Each structure stands twice: as structure tokens, then as C-alpha cells.
Amino acid sequence: KAGVTQTPRYLIKTRGQQVTLSCSPISGHRSVSWYQQTPGQGLQFLFEYFSETQRNKGNFPGRFSGRQFSNSRSEMNVSTLELGDSALYLCASSLVSNRGETQYFGPGTRLLVL
Amino acid sequence: SQQGEEDPQALSIQEGENATMNCSYKTSINNLQWYRQNSGRGLVHLILIRSNEREKHSGRLRVTLDTSKKSSSLLITASRAADTASYFCATVPIQGAQKLVFGQGTRLTINP
């Protein structure tokens, strides 16, 4: 089976712009979670989607949003980018839930905001 | 917010030696997982230990969990240069919206 894929791998944006990141989970996995990794804050949970519904959300402002499609692929969007949004954005998938199961991570999208 | 704290933040040892990393957390958990990350890339799942388990082995990895002390340790035996990476513990709290909650990680360097 192919692993979790994320596109694009690298992205450079300027403040005020918006960005959309994409994640394709492992075939058959229905749960997709997003994480932000920065040197200062470490790895932080953004949100989880399951069957096209947001099931859980972390403590991030409303500028961060996401969605999941019927084929379980997920996108996350960040609007009005700020310098502090520069980070590695990781997507992870699991069969049913991100609570008690192994999470399979993609390689990440590295976003640089100038 | 980070639930876990890892100790040490950085560890450098010689190839062949054993490496031990510790993780402490704050709330009651469903399970605890360890992940490895190479140079800012994706995370690779290493091992999962449930709250009712005390010890688990996988190859050269040994994980312990002490729920009374809210702590876990990861032991890598007979380390190899390829083990050089950052290691993160991640907990799944029983309550609250937070799901996988990661520690700050330990940067492990294996010197040949």
C-alpha cells in the first residue's frame, strides 16, 4: 500500500496570503489528522476529520480550517498568513480513530511565510 | 499545549551503546506511543503501549510505562548510526479534545 502523501512538499508565501495543503491517506483509512510542528511550540494537533466531518479540533484560530472529501482525502487551509505560521504541517491517517490506533504520518509540507 | 516532557532534550552516544529516553505526562491516558523523526521529515511510529501494560518490546526497542508516576521510557539497545533521529512520545488523553499530544522530543545522535 502506498503511504500517506502530502502536496506540495514545500511552499513559500507572503503575509496576508492564503494557502491550501493536501493530504491523501493510506487507502482504506478514514481518519485524517493534521499537526503543526515548529521549533518553539513543537508538534501541536490542529484537527481530525472522519467521514467528511471534523471530529476534533485543537487550539488554533479560525484562520486554520480543513475539510475531508468522500474519498478520505483532506485539505487544510490557512487564511491571512502570518510569519508565525511558518512550520512543517504533518498529516496522519488511521483506520478509524486517532485515539487508540497507530498514526501513519506523511512527509509533511514545509511552509515558509515571508 | 504540550502534555509531555522528554528527558534528555539531547543525547549523544557511541554506536553499540544503549540509549534511554524518558517521557513524563500530566493527565490520565488511553495509551502512549513513541515516534521517530529524521531531520524534520514525517514521523515514523515505533511502538504503542496501552495504559494497562507495563512493558513492551519490539526488536531492539523496549518501552516501559508507569501510570502511577505518569512516565514512560524508551530504550534502544545496541544503537546504530541509523538510529540518529529525534524521538517523540505522544499520549492519547482519556479526556479532552486533544488527541495525540506530543512531547518536545529527544534529539539522539549516534556517533560511529
Image: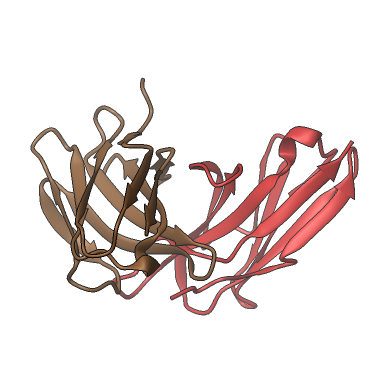
Task: Say whether residue A14 is left or right of residue B105.
Answer: left
What residue is shown at x 26% (from left), y 46% (from top)?
Answer: A32
Image colour assigned to chain B: red
Name the image quarter holding the N terminus of chain A: top left
Q: Tell which of B73 and A54 is nearer to you.
A: A54
Q: Tell which of A109 and B9 is nearer to you.
A: A109
Q: Is residue A88 among what the camera can see?
A: yes
Image colour assigned to chain A: brown
Task: Say whether residue A85 is left or right of residue B83.
Answer: left
Q: Tell which of B101 and A112 is nearer to you.
A: A112
Query: Could you say where residue A2 lies in the image, as x and y percent from the top left?
Result: 36, 22
Query: Could you say where residue A79 lies in the image, as x and y percent from the top left?
Result: 18, 62
What residue is shown at x 41% (from left), y 40% (from top)?
Answer: A104
Query: Could you say where residue B19 lies in the image, as x and y percent from the top left?
Result: 81, 51
What residue is shown at x 67% (from left), y 53% (from top)?
Answer: B63
Task: Say whether residue B9 is left or right of residue A84.
Answer: right
Name the image quarter holding the C terminus of chain A: bottom left
